[in-house]
Amino acid sequence: MPLPADFVPSLLARLTPRQSEIERWIRRAVEIESPSNDKPSLDRMADFLGDEFSAIGGRIKIHKSLTAGDQVQIDFPSRRGGKPVLVLGHHDTVWELGTLKSMPCHVTQGRIWGPGTLDMKAGLAQVLFALRALSEHFAGFPRPVTVLSVSDEETGSHASRAVTESLAKKSAAVLVLEPAQGLEGALKTARKGVGEYLLKVHGRAAHAGVDFPSGGSAIVELARQIQQVAKLTNLKRGLTLNPGVIRGGTRSNVIAAEAEAQIDVRIARPADAKFVESKLSRLRPFDARCRIEISGRINRPPMERTRGVAALFAQARTLAAGMNRAGGRPWVLEESSTGGASDGNFTAALGVPTLDGLGAVGEGAHAAHESVVLSEIPRRAALLAALIASI
């Protein structure tokens, strides 16, 4: 949709005076603690989002889940018709209930701090106020928009993936509210795929002092297998395998009968999913007294920088050029790739143009110094609104 030359600056002018209001909204959202493993808390957050988005004209649909929190879909119809833009976020966090006691939400040094601020309750605030600004500017919505906030992104999106993919297939593009990359606020045009495998070794227990030769150590076997797994890492092709957690044995004077390793896998190419699966399935024990068991899979495909993704980024960069950053500096929007994954991996793998990292600018996601730069919020919201209107 062609936009007038002054459209983006007018959006920013509309949103900038609302920075304090957005800040208060983020605080309210953060203080509804919503860890991925607590369904009642997640559903309270879902209800809060439903109330807030319905107040600006959204039609709420709750996707009930027995195994996770409910997913919240909000549809904004338009007289224009056509495929909607899907704006994708999540309302679960990695922080357990009670974290606010040691990490209270507060504002200082130009930032709002607290659990879930950056990942991603500030992102949810940005889309709420972006849509509100669009509705005010056009006296309605310039195109159909669907917002989906899921409850299990931090734990693999097992309950929500089908909903996300179903909506993405019906959409013209997907805009993902994950945090921007770094303090410069780069968008994300490529992400690695992610998988997790469990390598178990079953050995033969024996007394380490009385009957050592009869034992087959699962721990020794696992150590040798880990060396084989590590050899599969290929940094040039963006393939990494990390045995991040190992367990085994019962006592130091018992030859271990059981041992296991959790292996994190990251892939940059879709074909490497089959490569990893093939290599891991072919592992064979060095010690004939031991047996190997491997389970797991790649659960998020890579998000590749396709033509559709590149075109969305080019559009975003052009729109950003219509706004200045702090101090009057021109906003030159950059792109990045990352080894982390998001629900954008699912939508991009379907061939739907997807642009990620449109959420807040800050630092410390999943860490004690999690925080969001407040001055960047109106600008990010204006960019999101302009993208929605221009696609």
Image (spheres, rainbow, N blue to C red):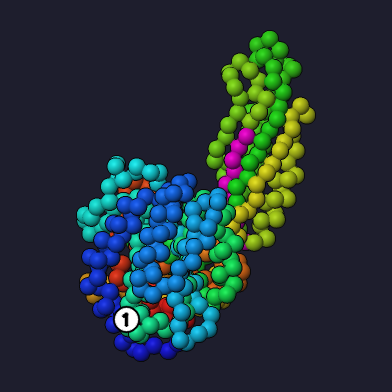
Q: Is residue 173 left or right of residue 329?
A: right
Q: Which contiguous range is marked in magenta?
A: 260-269
Dot 1 lies on which element? helix
Q: Please give the name of the residue rendered at 44% of the width and 54% of the height, measured from the top-left corner.
A: 43
Q: Please state the horizontal and vertical placement of residue 351, each as a whole percent of the image.
A: 60, 72
Q: Is residue 193 above or below residue 3?
A: above
Q: In the depicted view, which residue is nearer to us: 40 or 385?
A: 40
Q: In the depicted view, which residue is nearer to us: 94 or 261?
A: 94
Which residue is tagged 1? 136
Q: Which residue type carries mark 1?
A: Glu
User: Would you say the magenta stretch is mainly helix, strand or loop?
Assistant: strand
Q: Please state the horizontal and vertical placement of residue 306, each as a whole percent of the image.
A: 57, 72
Q: Is residue 76 left or right of residue 99?
A: right
Q: Please give the name of the residue rendered at 66% of the width and 56% of the height, measured from the top-left corner.
A: 273
Task: Examine the structure image and report whether residue 266 is included in the region drawn in magenta.
Answer: yes
The quarter of the rendered structure image containing the N terminus is bottom left
